[in-house]
Amino acid sequence: MPHVTHCPHCQKPLQIPDGAAGKPMRCPFCKQLFAVRLVPAAAIGKPASDTGPREPVNGAAANVAPSIQRPRSSPLGAAAVSAPPAAKPPVTKSPTQCPSCKAKLPFGATACTDCGYLLQGDGMAIDAEGDPNLCPNPACGVANQPHDRVCRRCSSPLPPPAGTMLHGCYRIEKLIAIGGFGAVYLATDTKRNNLRVAIKDMICAEPQEYAVRLSFFQREAEILRQLANLPIVPKFHDFVRQGQTAYLVMEYIQGQDLLKLMESNENKPFALDQVIDWGKSICDVLLHMHKQSPPVVHRDVKPDNIMLLDDRRSIKMVDFGTARDMGKSEKARLAAKTRVYTDGYAPPEQIIGKPEARSDLFALAGTLYHLATGKAPEGVYTARELESQLNAANGPIAAGDRWFYELLKINLAEDLNDRYFSCQEFKVDLERRQVTKEIACPKCQALSPIRQPYCSKCAEPLTDPAPPCGHCGKEIRMGSRCCIFCGARVR
């Protein structure tokens, strides 16, 4: 049976070869593009059956006067019945805007020409009712129908649609953001006077990854509990496990992250006074985390994870999913961790999987640099650029701001022993608006360079204790590059 379709523009029937379903085609009559939808040839209207004599055609018909022509009669002698009109096939709904990048789509398109986004695995368009359910699998990205729970292309689980009730009390209102590791929704807590909350959904398509992602979720819930008293951290409400997924319920933050704000404003930097105030607040959070036993390292401080509230001054730190403790034993602290980092904000030791508390200071310095200049940091190369600018006779840095960029340069150092030792030290210099360079010995009052482990005059310890020497086990001080007892190299 031949494949036949109608052009949705001029309604003329067209014969289509096999395998053309769902593909774009240009009508040879009206030259318009449309998505092919096949119908059986039998669906195309045919004239009614005729058992009466046929009129002569061509030359024979020319000898018959129009006045004596009569309509053909039906077999029953009734008046002639005209053939029913051909049924019009339903026109495929085609989106005009890419659900991913919002670019304009030509009629009948099966993929976005700007970003390559697939509209549907089978080439059909999304229903007009409801927003498309986007597949969270970064290797897929298909826009599924709003009611679908499994991706039609790769079979990955899809986030629940609006109106879904979770745990009997959380009603999903809308999707806020989605990525390869999870989705965040705005929801209503029906048991707390319809309180608006944010729900982080652990989307896990691979069963073998479930245990790893669940541990990240549980760790984030515990960290939010520990930071409950800090005003710039979202309040933790609940942690729910259902089947092969988990949900983290927390305070809903109404605002926009600092990176998007800068990008929407042509990467214009924020006022330096405001950046300094934000830096002090972030130091409070990191200091609280680093004082835990064992210390907890954030590992992903960056503008994307800082939300600016509607008052345009207050901030909230979000996404503690990458934070982890460094381990209780020396062996656990020195063992390589899962490599989690963002290029430009992560120091060398974190990139190789061995972060520590001073790694967060590197990321904080990179974040403040980005906010104050509008330029993304490039790790240790940014420190070298700042050093060059600070040493230049007529450099671009204003005299009153030199202390700030010198502080950033120090904490973007490649060697972690050249950075500040704690967030407390970082915050003190932000408050004083100067870089501390010397410290008095508590015993002899002699001045020694800041962060030098022992007094230059009397050898009195000047810095806090560090983990014991891995070779001889004796106590050493922060900033020591070698053990003073056995001479072993210290990290």
Image (cartoon, rainbow, N blue to C red):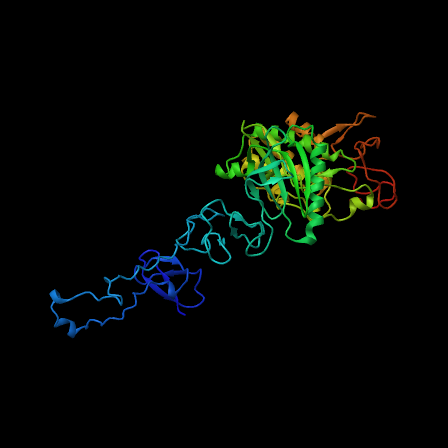
Image side of residue 275 versus residue 337, left or right: left
Image side of residue 213 versus residue 441, left or right: left
Front-most of 201 and 286?
201
Image side of residue 382 versus residue 47, left or right: right
Q: Residue furthest front?
A: 76
Front-most of 395 and 201?
201
Count up the numbered dots: 0
Residue positioned 43% across, 64% down in the render: 20
Residue positioned 60% across, 53% down in the render: 156
> Residue 224: x and y, percent?
69, 34
Front-most of 54 and 242?
54
Q: Quadrant of residue 475?
A: top right
> Residue 341: x and y, percent?
65, 45
Image side of residue 88 versus residue 258, left or right: left
User: In the rendered image, is residue 440 in sight?
Assistant: yes
> Residue 332: x and y, percent?
80, 45
Front-most of 174 and 337?
174
> Residue 255: x and y, percent?
55, 33
Tell me the quarter of the image containing the N terminus.
bottom left
Q: Residue furthest bottom?
A: 59
